[in-house]
Amino acid sequence: MPKVIFVNLPVTDLDASMTFYQSIGFVNKPHFSDNTAACMVWSEAINVMLLTHAKWRTFTSRPIPPATSSEVALTLSFDSRELVDAMNEAAAANGGTGDINPVQDHGFMYSRDMADPDGHIWGAMWMDPAAIPSGDQNQLQ
């Protein structure tokens, strides 16, 4: 079996969250979805499980953090700066918040961060490793 990641996220409004994730390029996998959860597919290896708060509580008794907290930031790679911009714009237009952090532009690497309707942080980034200045690998840190 190939290695696959399932990122599980608690959401307050499953339908609104599905709409948001579809607007930024995820596809719903109905086989793993119902009225308490939705499997949103990014790639063959990356899936996001959107879980209602009631469903989330069947996995853990730990509290659901408020939308203003930052526990983790997830970043997806894109083939161009334009696609990074498009994801950020789609997020802002579909219930999320665009540019929650300053835009990062290092020439060889470009990224923008957004939040979904529940405050989960997502980044979109483009990088051209061939454009990293010679001998300056520390710029990735």
Image: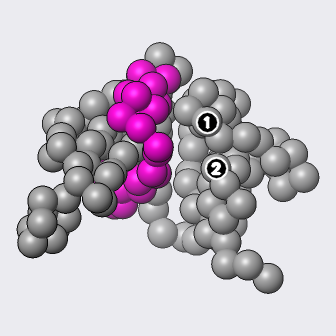
On screen, residue 59 versus residue 115, left or right, reads right
With respect to residue 45, does 49 lie above or below? Answer: above
Q: Secondary structure at mark 2?
A: loop
Q: Residue at x 28, y 31 (%)?
A: 99
Q: Which of these two is toward me, 122 or 58?
A: 122
Q: Could you tell which of marks 2 and 1 lies nearer the N-terminus? A: 1
In the rendered image, is residue 57 in sight? no
Determine which residue is flagged by label 2.
42
Q: Amino acid at mark 2?
A: Trp
Can you give x and y, in whole percent of width and height, for residue 120 in the image?
Answer: 42, 46
Residue carrying label 1: 25
Closer to us: 11 or 82 = 82
Amino acid type at circle 1 is Gly
Region in magenta: 67-90
Direction from residue 24 to residue 89 in the image, left or right? left
**Image quarter in which the N terminus is found:** bottom right
